[in-house]
Amino acid sequence: MASTANKPAPGKKTGSSRKRQNTHEGFLTHNRMYWAKLSGALALALILLYIFVPLPGTHFGSSWLGYTLGTIGALLILWLTMLGMRKRAITPGRWSLKAWTSAHVYLGLLVTVVGTLHSGFYFGWNVHTLAWALMLLVVGSGIFGIYAYATLPRALSANRYDEEGAITEKQMIEALRSLDRQIHDAAQPLDAQAAVLVGQSLEQDPFGGSFWNRVTGNYPNCATRHAINELRAIRASRQRTKEDLLGKIDAQLTRKESMLERLRQHLKLKSWLQAWLYIHVPVTFALIAALSAHVVSVFFYW
Amino acid sequence: MSFVVRQIALKSSGEEIVRSSNYGMREMTVGRDSACAIHLPDLAVNPVHARIALGADGLLTVTATTEQPFEVNGRSTRQAEVDPAVGGELAFGGHRIAVSQDEDGATPVLTVRRVEAVSDSAEDRDIGAAYSLKGLLPGKRLSAWGFSLLVLFAFLALPLYSYMSAKPLAMQADARRADGFHADETWTSGPLSVSHKALNDDCQACHTQAFVAVTDKACLTCHTKDAHDHISDKARLVQSRGEPTGMAAMQRAVAGAFNRPAGRCVDCHTEHEGAGAMPATQQQFCADCHNGMKGRLPDTKIADAADFGTAHPQFRPMIISGMDGDKPLLKRVAWSADLQEDNGLKFTHGQHLSKTNGIAQMVRRMPGQFTGKDALQCADCHATDSSGTRFQPVKMEESCQSCHSLSFDQIGGTTRTLRHGEPAMVVADLRAFYRGTAPARPANLSGMARRVPGDAALRSTAADYARAVRFYPGGADQAINQVFSKGGMCNDCHVVTRGGTTQTAGFAIQPVAQNDRYFRKGWFDHKAHVQADCAECHTGAATSNKATDLLVPGIDGKGGCRTCHVGGEGAKLASVSVKDPVDSSCAMCHSYHMDAGAPWVPKNDRKKAAGQTVAIAERPRFPVKLH
């Protein structure tokens, strides 16, 4: 998958350098885009067939070309769905998972051409157009997935790196825990009002928030942000003392906030990498259901 | 009087460390402040949250120092009494203080334990799940099942239910499903045509049985009178179609395997193709049999045809071949450029359409009376019928008489004309004219002067006049002869023979017939060609100087149909360049059922032929009595 595009080439991992030789070939360019070329050629051939083959009836599902396209499309959809099963078994070589994924992507694009030609461009409020629309939704979410896989891992990496090197997901939590402990200890002398504010920051789940918060990376109810703002207001209204406890806590909360920001950016990118599958997979099954209803209906009211 | 406070901390291994200390006082403070006897490093706890006092009766009184409460045995309060003998639990923020008694039965023991982590992040969590969308979105498996079942329910189960519940009504001519939406309508592949619109809610009107392709029987349930076979002899139909070969044979085999027999009404009358008129039957359906049919059906009288542009026989117009009394005898002959048809008139188109002769001059002298300014136009004589398809017969009174006048007398400003089409009446009128009138009386005979000698001239005039009066009625015969003979009114246009009765003074007019439809096996609509000039097709009109010239165009040549009509699939365009090609499959001119109407216009737009009834796509409504 494209997310592996940023992983180092097989071999010894040095860990010292961020600059790596990229010998990786993603599923998009697999085998010199063999499946892209094949799908493109098939799409062109089918379109030419559609235009030039004289059909006895109108261009519709119910001509020999229509039935042929429909059969090809339905079988293609079933085969494409099988990637979910196939991906759980990793094999090398000609029918490697990468080859299979490459074929999945390009034949998945081809299925829109097959399905649309099968429709003969007749659309209406019926189960047939429903199946077609679900197919487009599945392919559309798949295209988005490819876009996500091709672009987001780079941003994900960039977000994990800073001047001290990369940070892992586990380290992100550890960093937060450490900051929380420090804040907790430092905040002990605080009065009740300020302690509650700091306490809210500590009690808030860093992985909390809704799906919307996740995908936008926008957390308007962030207790840490809130605590920083409120404590700054309190600090501004008070006389400065020699021991600036609030100033110290502010510095620590600010560090926590920047860590949280990085975590949230990470969560946001990961959610984009995953969210499309929550459409792609369930709608695929809805599509197969609609496809079954479509096929049954055609033969039922023959 | 003292307290024992046990602070319990946890090692990372989970092992407990207990630090016990004695406080020899009656009252202790609980709070975050390190000065408190019970120090709770907890931000949810106030610096001095509560006081615990030991009473003389051994009871502990816990009192909050501020408005902020604490919990006793799970209940929030600001003051409480706890009996160490009984025991109890106090909760401050993330800490619990268990109250008990020492073994001596006198010293209360307060066991302090942190139960909540310092922060939420410090709590254990499954990293894999935390970084995924788990819990934020319904699971993929769940929604996959949900969506699929929803779709199967709405688009498979419900339609099947509609079908099953209305099944008993199928194939009953007088039964109909209830109006309104039925779930199986989601199975439609498109709206029905105009004529079947009313059946849009009633799938089972045609789809009577599950997994059985629409049968002719379903069509004939309603079309009891207006549907009939192309030819009655089915064997000939099959023979003319021949055995399919190659691709067609495979299609037939596949269709057969899927229980879709060939030769049904719906093979040609396709439906669900939009809400307009039913689409025209594809050329292929005709050509399957008619292409090379002579080879398969040698005794057929019908010529082979496959595509109008490339394979269509020459037209065979129906022309007048003679007259049987007043009725024309019609005959179909192959069209040729010099085909002649005698309609009994001497009218020549070339003469009348000329722009230079006396006729044109007459048009110029009577501005406003004709369509054109400088010569006669087609429309001056030819008017279309109400549908615009064909032309009405030319009427003498309306189209000819303004020039070819039949007037013979004038009385007090009123012109008397001879009766057109009634030669006997012409003869009678002329005779009456000569009997009832006298020659004009000479002026010099009209005075009152007495006769005086020497006016011999006057006497001679009187004698001449008397003779003229005596013989005046005999002039009628001369006039009648004149009218019917060359140079006479009738003879200008009609062929006059000497075979008449005495009533018509021995003259006879050759009967006239006007042919209103030359192509009876095909459909030609003038209205569809209204953009074109008449002469574009009737090219010979302006130069035809023979009355018998047939000006109807043929399939080819100048003005022929193929000038524009290139056939169904434009095969002709491969070899010939056509300026404005018109796609014209068989159905444009030929109707399968061959009634008198135009092919492929919605039936309600057609002029209804006598004896033809059209089924209406509407059946009696619910409720019906079921037997």
Image: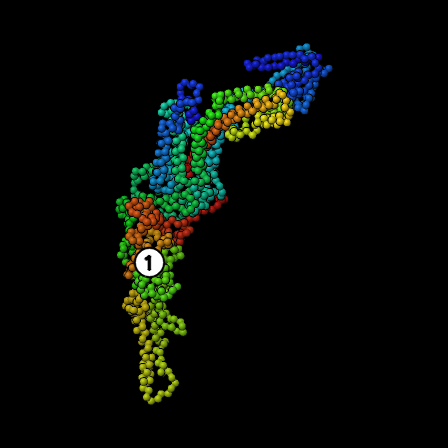
Is disc 1 placed on a helix, strand or loop?
Answer: loop
From this viewpoint, which residue is outermost toward the bottom? Answer: B453
Q: Residue at 35%, 68% (x, y): give it.
A: B405
**For mark 1, what is the residue?**
B515
Direction from residue A210 to residue B39 in the image, left or right: right
Residue at (51% x, 25% y) in the render: A262
In the rendered image, which quarter is residue A150 located in? Answer: top left
User: Measured along the vertical axis of the image, is residue B107 above or below residue B291?
Assistant: above
B280 over B476 or under it: above or below: above
Residue B321 image point, x, y percent = 28, 58
Residue, x 38% and y 57% (percent of image)?
B385
Please state the horizontal and vertical placement of residue A100, each as a whole percent of the image.
Answer: 39, 27
Quarter where residue B67 is shown: top right
Q: Quadrant of the N terminus of chain B?
A: top right
The foreground one among A215 and B548 is: A215
Dividing the picture into quadrants, the one containing residue B453 is: bottom left
A276 above or below B268? above
Q: Chain of mark 1?
A: B
Look at the image and tell me whether residue A223 can be seen: no
Q: Which residue is situated farthest in the top direction here?
A: B104
